[in-house]
Image (tube, rainbow, N blue to C red):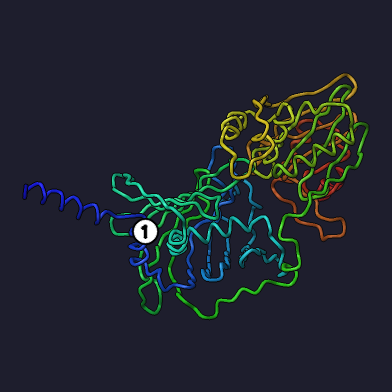
Amino acid sequence: MLKKASVTFALLVLAGCARTPKNVVDDVGKAIGAGNLKSIQYSGSGYIYAIGQSFQPNDRYSKFNLKSYTRVVDYDKGASRDEDVRTQFENPPRGGGVQPVIGERRAVAFLSGDSAWNIGANGTPAPAAAAIEERQVQLAITPHGWVKAATAAENPTMESKTEDGKPVTVVSFTWKGKYKVSGFVNDQNLLEKVDTWLPNPVLGDMVTETTYSGYKDLGEIKSDVMFPSRIVQKQGGYPVMDLTISKTDANNPYVVFPVPDSVEKAPQAPPPVKVESQKVGDGVWYLTGGTHHSVAVEFKTYVALVECPLNDDRAVAVLDVVKKTIPNKPIRYVINSHNHFDHSGGLRACVAEGATILTSTDNKPYYEKVWAMPHTLNPDRLAKVPKKPVVEAVADKRVLTDGTQTLELYHLQGSNHTDTMLLGYLPKQKVLIEADVYNPTPANAPAAPPTKENINLNDNIKRLKLDVQQITPLHGRLVTIADLKKVVGEN
């Protein structure tokens, strides 16, 4: 009887000592000094990557040197300031992301509660309403931010796992009622990794994995604040940032991010999508009204749309304008210029429309894979009305014709921007359709020096023996072939 009572007591003691999610989070907070931390600034250098701007669809994203990086976070106010200075990594450039960087390029991004803005090259604040939630999530998944978010979370869960052969405890919770956040804690009570999911037009519920290692007291004045000396973040399986942290400054009392008047008075939601239609030839319309353009081509019984960019909102607006401009004809084909996310982010809406997607050969398997991924965080048209994608690959050339209207598609050779670029050409109208390799500046702007991509485009036009008179760039403004010739020095 005594033995049985002893065993029962021992089990009760063990049960009472079992760790809970709260215990784990508290232990992490003590280990890294999160309890009294109100703000922190950390600085370093490393590499930064332009998401979705890879040379080929299954390559890493385009890479830049991160000469310097500084982030200031105020946890009490839900505010942050990120500043980076990047330089060119590869020469010649490989992929997109506005390359090459001549000298240095500086970017500054702010978050203050429910306001977000960027500082442009001219020093003027520009509202960034579409970035608010992601910046709030990024603040919550910093090591000390995770402790604070996990402490405030309702009903966090806990499980034991093995990562890279080592035991870890995973504490998960839902942040702001929408975002699942999982923190991986090692046997030293240090947060090694945080997984969360963010909405992306191409990748859907995009896995965002941030790893932390080499925790140290990196402050000039010693404190109990421990911070990782290396941070690596991946999105969609590829790195977007790789930082080596060299310095921290905790609880600086001068962290203030006043919201500029121009931002405070601006709507804290993305502005309505604007699409304007301009006829540029027989049965051809140039669709502008934003940073990314499209071209609609009318055939006898259908419409072919060249480019459906950015995201679902832009795509739906473009499709609606095409239907009004060319009524009673289905949009049978949508031509995708290349794999970069800003040019492929609206294609899912076109799939839902029932259009066949024409794209470069290497893009076909990639699109079929990513379009099967869940889109629950920001359900788009295809998520709401599922439809099997119909994708046709274009190798070197594809011609759409009905005997009256003809649209020719060609693979652009020799580009460092992407290996999957398609050009469109309308022989009857002598109109070329191109993306990214020639972005004409405003007519009254100083002439820009020629780029390698400008020269390569001109060489491809000559190689293909295209009689081009007009160019409808998918960025920039309507120009003539003489404008391109002038840029490359042939006039």
Residue closest to the far front: 1
Residue at the image position 61 percent from the left and 73 percent from the top:
257
| 224 left or right of 16 in image | right
Instruction: Say which quarter of the image contains residue 113.
Output: bottom right
Q: Is residue 9 visible?
A: yes
Near mark 1 (Cα within 10 A), the count class, few <14, some 14-19 or many ≥20, is: some
Instruction: Say which quarter of the image contains residue 48.
Output: bottom right
Residue 333, given in percent of the width and then of the height, sits at 76, 27
Instruction: Say which quarter of the image contains residue 332.
Output: top right
| 33 left or right of 307 in image | left
Residue under label 1, please give it: 22
| 105 left or right of 155 in image | right
Count how many numbered circles sit on residues in the image.
1
Viewer-side residue, 253 vs 160:
160
Q: Secondary structure at mark 1?
A: helix
Residue closest to the far left: 2
Viewer-side residue, 350 vs 42:
350
Residue at the image position 86 percent from the left and 26 percent from the top:
329
Q: Is residue 125 above or below residue 325?
A: below
Residue 41, given in percent of the width and then of the height, sits at 49, 71
Residue at the image position 72 percent from the left and 67 percent from the top:
263
Residue 426, given in percent of the width and then of the height, sits at 85, 31
Q: Is residue 169 above or below residue 367?
A: below
Amino acid carrying label 1: it is Lys
| 58 left or right of 429 in image | left
Q: Is residue 416 visible?
A: no
Residue at the image position 37 percent from the left and 49 percent from the top:
158
Viewer-side residue, 200 vs 394:
200
